Amino acid sequence: MDKRTLLAIVLSLAVLMVYQIFFVKPPVPQKGAPPQKATEQVKKDAANAPVSAAQASATNAGRPAPKTATGKPEAPPRDITVETTHYTAVFSTRGAALKSLKLKDYYQDCYECTDDIWPKLKGLFTGAKEPPKSKTKEFVELVDVRDGMPYPLAVTFPDSSADVAPDAVFETLTGKLDLTSTKEKQQLVFSKSYDNIKIEKIFTFDPAGYTFGMEVKVHNLTSAPITQIPRLNWYQYVDPQKIDDSYGHDGPVISVGGSIEREEVKKLDHESILGPNVLWGAFESKYFIASFIPENPSLTNVVVTRDEANMVAVGMKGRKELIPGGQNSVFTYSLYLGPKQYDSLKTLGVGLEGAIDFGWFKWLAIPALWILNFLNGFVLNYGIAIIILTTIIKIIFWPLGNLSYKSMNEMKKLQPKIEALKQKYKNDQSKIGQETMALYREHKVNPFSGCLPMLIQIPVFFGLYKALMYSIELRQSPLFFWIQDLSAKDPYYITPIIMGATQFISQKMTPAMGDPMQQKIMLLMPVIFTFFFLNFPAGLVIYWLWNNILQIGQQYYINKKLAT
């Protein structure tokens, strides 16, 4: 087997092995509860489901409970709605916490709602109307809690002079905030008074995006100093029966000193403490994130737990503060609750964009995403933008392709002489190698130049793979007809099959070298690639398909030019 053929097989298998090792997990069924599914808890008043002491403070498991502040009897909880152009947030006076947050710019995955090509095509020929869909699309919901669970953004004070239960009912004078027709920031203020302390939680909303501020003021109502250590908590129910997303992570993610740490929920059987020097902490899904940024990273830790009811708690433990009698202290956080959009996260300046899993190839994935966004601004279709980007890449590598095809044609012409050398020195492999290399030098042929384009395309392939897989811009972005989500696989496997056919044609047009068995092995490669591309994102398949079509055109051009 000649070195060029062997190297091509090895490189092809390497692509498949890397994909198997780093990307392939058990496939996710198309039907089921979406990761960010809204729950009945959002529609119910949780006041009818009191929280037990054990459930109320999941982050305190295994430690003696601190002294809990006491005060006057609590009023029934009520809801306060905050409306912006980007989201609808529902806060509850129970815990002065977040009961619901729906993103207006994004819909949940709803496979029953997905447009189907077959009824559309049938209607073109018969005039039949498409039957109504069984479900309507709903906005993405970031909060997922169950009855009896505390709400996210509740603040507690474990290991302090006085703790506050996460379900304590606060007071507020605000009934509703509407920021849809204003550019001014607005505040929502909650307060709760006890015998010894008064807690104020002040949320400051900016109508321009998904970021809002949060201040926690602790007033010492006694004459003696008290010590308070705040813990900002995000509570999330995780269904133990839900099959994990093959390509995403649902769970806690923390930046410790700039290093991204992810906690696997199913393996979380004990309290996990990360820090200090926590730049941010969050609960994420593949495309969305609920994150909180402390004012003093060097004094911040994150405590992650999961209880027997499958409630995951991500608690950001702040600095220890000694508050003199009659004085107060302020703890400040910035919150980002929204899509994992690279540009938006990067503007926060704390490395939150690292939550997007671009991996080792981010140095290619990020430029590819930038170019795709730029092109989409003109063509208004990410599928077309992928085709244009593929064409640009092909033009850049066109000279290398010409060199490769010319080299393979020269290698083909030398095959009879190489076979003669093999017969002449059949008992001396070392001599065969020496004479073969001498033959290459005599005819100025580089046996490895035929593999050069493949070597260069491997990092480009994986960089674009990451950009297409984890960029929210491509989520639910259609091309046409049956391809309604370029980040998901082709539901009918049409494009992978066409891709395999074009790769087979390209392989047939490649100058055949070596014995017939080697040629048959090379012709099997399109079949193997088709099999692995079946579950690739449709956008990535379109990239490879269009690249094959351009390659066929280039091979035809070179072969015709060499024949004249």
Image: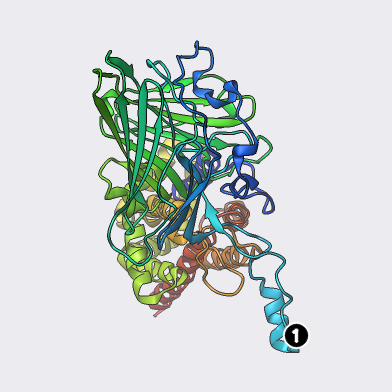
The 10 Å Cα crowd at callout 1, few under 14, some 14 to 19, many 20 or more, is few
Considering only vertical position in the picture, is 38 above or below 76? below
Rendered position, 544 above or below 518: below
- Write down the residue under mark 1: 128
Q: In this view, does 207 lie to the left or right of 470?
A: left
> Is 361 in front, or is 549?
361
Display colour scheme: rainbow
Q: Is residue 264 left or right of residue 459?
A: right
Q: Is residue 285 visible?
A: no
x and y, in percent, of residue 274 in the image = 39, 23
Write down the quadrant of residue 402 in the picture: bottom left
Considering only vertical position in the picture, is 122 above or below 106? Answer: below
Figure disc tally: 1
In the rendered image, residue 345, in percent from the top left (x then y), is placed at 33, 49
Which is nearer the eye, 505 or 279?
Answer: 279
**Residue name at image x 34 percent, y 58 percent:** 207
Secondary structure at numbered mark 1 = loop
Q: Residue at x 38, y 54 (%)?
A: 341
Query: Is 515 left or right of 162, judged from the image as shown?
Result: right
The C terminus lies in quadrant: bottom left
| Frontmost residue, 296 versus 190 | 190
Q: Can residue 176 be seen in this view?
A: yes
Residue 38: x and y in percent read 60, 50
Residue at the limit of the structure toward the front, as seen here:
72
Residue 194 higher or lower than 36, as above or below: above
For residue 119, what is the image quadrant? bottom right
Label 1 is placed on what type of residue?
Ala
Q: Which residue is drawn at 31% across and 16% down?
A: 227
Q: Percent position (x, y) of residue 374?
A: 32, 67
